[in-house]
Amino acid sequence: MREYTILLDAKKMPDVWYNVLPDLPTPHAPVLHPGTQQPVGPDDLSPIFPMGLIEQEMSPEPEISIPGEVMDKYRLYRPTPLRRAWRLEEALQTPAKIYYKNESVTPSGSHKINTALAQAYYNKIEGVNSLSTETGAGQWGTALSIACAMFDMKCQVFMVRVSFEQKPYRKSMMEAYGASILPSPSDATEVGRKLREAYPNTTGSLGMAISEAVEVAVMSGGTTKYSLGSVLNHVCMHQTVIGQEAKLQMESVGDYPDVVIGCCGGGSNFAGIAFPFVQDKLKKGLDTDFIAVEPTACPTLTRGPYAYDFGDTGQLTPLIKQYTLGHNFMPPGIHAGGLRYHGVAATVAHLVKDGVMRAVALYQNPCFKASLTFAKCEGILPAPESAHAICAAMDEAVKCRESGEAKTILFNLSGHGHFDLSAYDAYLSGNMQDVALEEEALQKGLESIPQVNEPS
Amino acid sequence: MREYTILLDAKKMPDVWYNVLPDLPTPHAPVLHPGTQQPVGPDDLSPIFPMGLIEQEMSPEPEISIPGEVMDKYRLYRPTPLRRAWRLEEALQTPAKIYYKNESVTPSGSHKINTALAQAYYNKIEGVNSLSTETGAGQWGTALSIACAMFDMKCQVFMVRVSFEQKPYRKSMMEAYGASILPSPSDATEVGRKLREAYPNTTGSLGMAISEAVEVAVMSGGTTKYSLGSVLNHVCMHQTVIGQEAKLQMESVGDYPDVVIGCCGGGSNFAGIAFPFVQDKLKKGLDTDFIAVEPTACPTLTRGPYAYDFGDTGQLTPLIKQYTLGHNFMPPGIHAGGLRYHGVAATVAHLVKDGVMRAVALYQNPCFKASLTFAKCEGILPAPESAHAICAAMDEAVKCRESGEAKTILFNLSGHGHFDLSAYDAYLSGNMQDVALEEEALQKGLESIPQVNEPS
């Protein structure tokens, strides 16, 4: 009997988050204060984050216990299934084995809820009853809306204006859980008003929406804190339940991945699937290949310089050493909204710089094509972000067909595409543009194109 | 440790469908030919269905083996989780235990795919490479589109016009799997053209869409067969994997339901969760309470007469003994599109008539209210159809709070509401009307209101 779905006994669910910081092969570049340019301390971050999360952000501990109340919420939908893509393997006629972790079955429809629940919890126990945040495609806003509903908290979401207009049902879904949603940039914040003045026709960006949500927290005097859906170390860490579960599930069928793949915007879903296996690479010397997949329209890891930069357009966040296309970068309007971010998690950037992981950039049309092949084989319609991981996994599997290698490939299916049907419409009608940053830059007459990064 | 999610080992997945026909307590009324009014034989049905399904429709066997190829497809997403709604119980302060089977995690987002895969398979092995069908809310059309994609078959879906217009993304989703979609009534069929002439402003109905899909099959000369998403015995039977799994899962935690609840349109999801427990009631004399939940706007079981009627508006289907509001009945435009059907499965009707099961009718506003309470407790945003089951389950749990009884309640969460956000918008904005058939009838000056049915 073929095992299509590999479940994990609920009793074996990981009860710790894995922290990659102490395992990094070279010293980690500190986060700098935006004003003093000196390393930030916990007090610098306390206006926007609760102390519980600040401690995790900087923790030297390799493992952090997951609190019982968070575990109870995880148990509503975790462990998620690991699936062997037998039908996709057959369709590709590849000797490779393809596995994917199915995070699309969570209540929010993506992996994002893994950190949303943790963040809501740590705020709640410190007496914070209101969170502000940004969302692009809407996956993160939905996740935080659900988490806030579960912990009886208020939730204010700044939604990138283009998504707010294109995806009214994402807004409705967040509202169904009791959140309030504003299109960003909005008139509700000082930074929003300034951005609207500077860019009257802007469709918004994650960088702008972050600035607004941070301002709301800072100006609240402590009643509202800010919550970020990716990039930060504590966020990536919360997502490691994905990779830890996957490792146990693969072990139960006697397998271990040669290649681990995730799409990469801010980096948290990629970190989530990859870091528990990265630990093995660093500690046991395994030769696992880690591939972060980004869009050619926003090729942070493959084209951005490795440098200190802000996390937001309004320059309100600390400076983080990362690959970046610049905090003023306005990503082209591709359909994978969750991958339209100028920067990336410092930990992911660090591991790419050190050559432990690598990145590829893909055009969106082949990603949608791959996604529909996947849907027809496996049933699930993926989010456009996840389509990037699928496309890279299929590329690897095709390489195996050509080389005859029987590699074991694992990727993270970060979410479903139920709110992305307009994107599939565009693809099916042949109206989807393939955008690469270089071409965009040339068209706009910009003088420089960021250099290709090689592991240093 | 609280067990929130009760999984079933894939090896224990049921490999038979349960057929309630031989266990019915009184003789089953035969299906009649629409022309001769005599009982139909297999040959009468062969222009529209493959022989494999016709045999199942009339089978005297209590169990039918699930073919290996169908089991393999089921293994892509089954067994589905059973969940204990601890948080909902707490919110209701009820001593009752509430369990629900979560069919919202299937690739199609509802239980419908359980029969879609089986129907595609039985057509495929008889050389049929094209299926026609109807869809209301879009759950069934999506399921059959996926099943056809998996078996490399063509799929033609007639979508009730009002849903076609209100839910463009449902259409897009079916197209993503390769199906072709037409709004019904359409100009593509003779019956469609007649219906458009007779009712120029009609928004369509399931009864009309069925007529069109049946005509396509009949006129194809055997290359296309028709596929129905509910009502028929083979459809209800395919859904019994839900109840069989639920029984094993409840057994694994030492429980058995006192009350089994499902929403009821055509009856297949209700039959699916209920019939395996009905078997125990009939054979072991258990006192289980079975509640079919329908909308007040389309109260087939609670208000319709028990009589022979057509399954479709165009009078193309055989005559089925059922509760019915009349094949010309035009249901009011409520938001649970899947519950807007004039008739109901003959087996469900039979068991209600015999007093083995019962039915209640609920207004839609309290169902949406219940659904949002559920969403905030359990995370999942339910389909409006499933909201009816949730509301009835919560009503039962509240009765337990008042009586002090600690009943065990099981309901089927038949699908998610990701394509029903406009309905939630209407509810949240206070613009949702509560419609009862009686009021409608009175407003329209109709002379008669169907009588309330009591078990005979």
Image: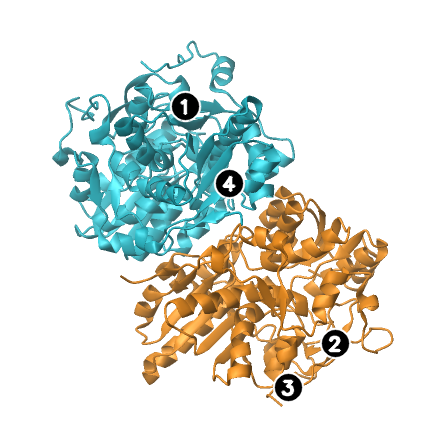
Chain colours: A cyan, B orange
Mark 4 and mark 2 residues within 8 Å of each other at the beta carbon? no
Residue type at numbered disc 4: Gln
In this view, the residue in front, B172 or B363, is: B172
> Badge 3, how many Cα within 10 Å: few under 14, some, many 20+?
few
The dot on residue B309 is 2
- Spatial CA distance of label 3 from label 1 is 68 Å
The dot on residue A445 is none
**Chain of residue at mark 2:** B
N-terminal-most mark, 4 or 1: 4
The dot on residue B451 is 3
**Chain of residue at mark 1:** A
Q: Could you say which quadrant of the image residue A239 lies in? A: top left
The residue at which mark 1 appears reads as A359
N-terminal-most mark, 2 or 3: 2
**Chain of residue at mark 4:** A
Tell me the SS state at disc 1: strand
Respond whether the residues carrying marks 2 and 3 are from the same subunit.
yes
Q: Could you say which quadrant of the image residue B71 lies in? A: bottom right
- Counting from the top left corner in percent of width and height, residue B188 is at 80, 52
Tell me the SS state at disc 3: loop
Respond whether the residues carrying marks 3 and 4 are from the same subunit.
no
- Nearer the observer: mark 3 or 1; the answer is 1
- Counting from the top left corner in percent of width and height, residue A134 is at 35, 39
Mark 3 and mark 1 residues within 8 Å of each other at the beta carbon? no
> Badge 2, how many Cα within 10 Å: few under 14, some, many 20+?
many
Count all numbered tags in the image, as a single digit. 4
- Nearer the observer: mark 1 or 2; the answer is 1
At 18% across and 52% down in the image, what residue appears? A125
**Quadrant of image for the C terminus of chain A:** top left
